Image (spheres, grey):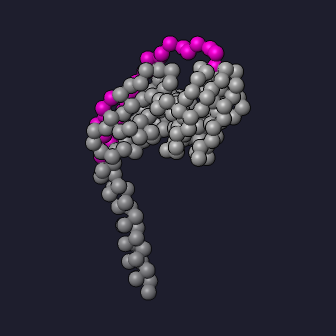
Amino acid sequence: MRIASFVRNAALLIAVTGIPVVAQQGTGYLKTKVDPGRAGVFIDGKYVGSAGNFGVGRKYAVAAGEHEVRLSEPRYEDVVTKVTVQAGKTAQLAQTMKALPLAKPPFGRLRTVAPDKFAAVYVNGKFMGHAGEFNNSVQGLLLNPGAYTVKIGEGREEQVKIEADKVTIIQAK
């Protein structure tokens, strides 16, 4: 009985310790060091998160191979580049984005409410940040008055009208 238990536990230990090796065979990592750190990172068109948190670059697990990486932040020019990730290794992406001219007032404020605070927020198809950045009374996205199409995460798009000096709140469905 003790030998059977020992053999079973040994086999389980061997199987469990082999998992990371098998998992890493087709996976590498992308580490970002981007200024500004709040820029959104898109890998092959899919939003994976912000480039950094509190000034520290983020590291993302990525399938080995060549990938298109887009960095997007509404106050900066988008950056698109190709990155080759090798299995079990970390590719580095360091980038300083070029600032755009500041928008001019008047502004209205767009607030978002979503169960996932890291859900990407798009306005007229452009990434603006994540839902948690625009979700309370002291936060919000300043936009010039007008009609906009807003999408939160992978949810449906919604048409909103922004008015000067007013707050518009939308909820993710």
The residue that appears at 62% across and 26% down in the rendered structure is: 162
Q: Does the image show residue 170?
A: yes
Q: Is residue 96 magenta?
A: yes
Is 113 inside the magenta-drawn segment? no
Look at 55% across and 29% down and name the residue there: 148
The x and y percentages for residue 14 are 36, 67
Residue at the extreme right of the image, as rendered: 137
**Which quadrant of the rendered structure holds the N terminus?**
bottom left
User: Based on the displayed image, in which of its 4 quarters is residue 86 positioned?
Assistant: top left
Question: Where does residue 147 sit, x and y in percent of width and height?
Answer: 57, 27
Left or right of 52: which side holds 113? right
Residue 72 occupies quadrant: top left
In this rendering, the answer to whether 8 lies above or below 85 is below
What's drawn in magenta, residue-wise?
81-107
Q: How many marks?
A: 0
- Using the image as rendered, state which of residue 24 and residue 102 is in the foreground: 102
The residue at 40%/67% (across/down) is 13
Q: Residue furthest bottom?
A: 1
Q: Is residue 105 left or right of residue 119?
A: right
Can I make out residue 59 in this image? no
Percent across and percent down for residue 27 are 33, 48
In depth, the one of 69 and 135 nearer the eye is 135
Tell me the residue at 30%/45% (across/down).
64
